Image: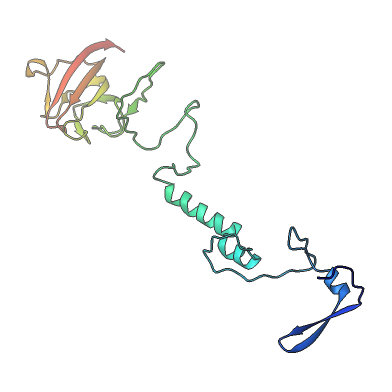
Amino acid sequence: MAYGKIKADAIIYDNSGSDVEVSTADITSKANIASPTFTGTPAAPTATAGTNTTQIATTAFVTTAVPTNSAIDARADARVTAAVGSSVQAFDADTTKNDVANTFTAAQTLNAGLTVDGPYKQAAEAVSALDIDLSTGNYFTKTINGNSTFTFSNPPASGTVGSFTLELTHTSGTVTWPSSVKFNSDTAPTLTTGKTHLFYFTTDNNGTRYRGAALVDYVN
């Protein structure tokens, strides 16, 4: 076997029966097998989706395998949307922090109870006619100057306690209460005209029966 150097401008090799001439300058510009550095736009076969080997991944393979930012955002939006109303509370512009004053336009249900540290205020509802509507409040005021027959409406459902106070300014006339009202000894109090009287009523059976109590004859 001979060793030495060959100086040539080109090399001819047999390519399946055809002679192919390659410039030695092209040979020297070929990338190394180990740690090659490519220039230009090198290409490679694109692996099928799901391939998990050490072969080269082309940009076409990566685009298919990795979702775009818009696809990721869409998936995230879908998960968030599914959670809203179940594990995530829906946004409500009317919701305020609990450390500021809150105004509730609908009845609130507090199953764990209510603890008040501070004043508890109840609006006094002026009664325009002679019906006491329990759905509007718990403290009512009324002035009468003639015979008056009161009615009570909209008590809470049976099993739920409803109570109210009536501040009655009594100029003149008699007072007739609903037949469902039961006073002590089943006798309505005697009222003095020209005085103010306080009446307390409570029911727990949807207004079938009201138990009443009275503090009468306050000086106006």
Question: Which of the colour schemes (rainbow, by chain, secondary structure, one colour) is used?
Answer: rainbow
What residue is shown at x 60% (from left), y 66% (from top)?
61
Q: Residue furthest front?
A: 1
Task: Please name whichever residue, 104 or 16, is drawn nearer the observer in this view of the structure.
Answer: 16
Q: Position of residue 115 (x, y in %)?
A: 35, 20
Q: Quadrant of the C terminus?
A: top left
In the rendered view, does 73 fall on the left or right side of 122? right
Residue 21: x and y in percent read 83, 83
**Residue closest to the eye, 40 or 21:** 21
The image shows residue 142 at horizontal and vertical percentages of: 29, 25
Q: Residue at x 28, y 34 (%)?
A: 135
State the residue at coordinates (29%, 26%).
138
Q: Image height check: is 186 above or below 111?
A: above
Position above or below: 139 against 40: above
Q: Is residue 166 left or right of residue 16?
A: left
Which of the image's four quarters has the N terminus?
Answer: bottom right
Q: Is residue 136 left or right of residue 9?
A: left
Residue 194, image x and y in percent?
Answer: 26, 15
Q: Where is residue 192, by image quadrant?
A: top left
